[in-house]
Image (cartoon, rainbow, N blue to C red):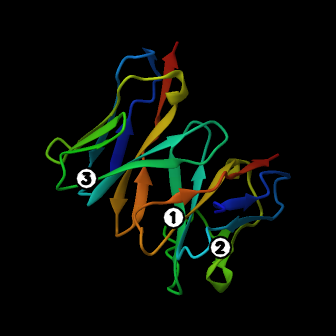
Amino acid sequence: SQKIEQNSEALNIQEGKTATLTCNYTNYSPAYLQWYRQDPGRGPVFLLLIRENEKEKRKERLKVTFDTTLKQSLFHITASQPADSATYLCALEFAGNMLTFGGGTRLMVKP
Amino acid sequence: GAGVSQSPSNKVTEKGKDVELRCDPISGHTALYWYRQSLGQGLEFLIYFQGNSAPDKSGLPSDRFSAERTGGSVSTLTIQRTQQEDSAVYLCASSSRQEQETQYFGPGTRLLVL
């Protein structure tokens, strides 16, 4: 069956360091993969989309990689700030524009 | 412009009662999605509306769940004979025809079934 795995344990890092979050999947061949940010009590907010034929995508301090052979995406936040503290969700496309989401990883950036 | 709105923001109900949750998508967005998020979990797809096409109901967990979208805009998710395991945050999202891959989420309705 299809499965998406994100580290369920919180990631704690020091301000200024690079945060790296992992999304692994099995039994999918998504046309694209997305990352969303979710703050407590809020709905997810779209951050980045990367397509199957793209290796890397950047947006300001964010970088996403997509390895369709390893079936893995890495999400990096450089020069992290306490305001980056949130839960980050990985989502994979299936059946057109439908998305299936991972369980998310909570990031805590300490000043 | 206004984002996706949902109402009520919180709903407490007794087991066995019916509830209706409302979603107002972004104006002009043709696609509308409902998801369920249990505490500390990822989003579980429930149902998808695209324009005037028949909805994709493949994610609805039981026949107690139903949804409709009137006039291609507002959507209502109905849960009949609620159970305690229905307690979760119900999230609605919409997307435009021009940017179909990006979903814009509402703040969710927190449902607690006692």
Q: Given the image, on which type of amino acid does mark 2 rest?
A: Ala
Q: Which of A60/B111 is in front?
A: A60
Asked if one can make out residue A1 in the rendered structure from this viewpoint, the answer is no
Q: In terms of depth relative to the viewer, which is nearer, B59 or A106?
A: A106
**Residue shown at 13%/45% (left/top)?**
A69
Q: Amino acid at mark 1?
A: Gly
Per the image, the residue denoted by label 2 is B67
Amino acid under disc 3 = Asn
Circle 1 residue: B59
Chain letter behind tag 3: A
Percent coordinates x, y for residue A95 in the rendering: 34, 68
Cβ atoms at labels 3 and 1 below 8 Å apart: no
Which is nearer the eye, B24 or A81?
A81
Crowd rating for badge 3 (residues with CA inside 10 Å; few <14, some 14–19, many 20+): few
Q: Secondary structure at mark 1?
A: loop
Horizontal side, residue A53 vs residue A73: left or right: left
CB contact under 8 Å: marks 2 and 3: no
Name the chain under label 1: B
Q: What's the CA distance linking mark 2 and mark 3?
A: 29 Å
What residue does disc 3 label? A27
Distance in Å between CA atoms under marks 1 and 2 = 12 Å
Residue B68 is labelled as: none
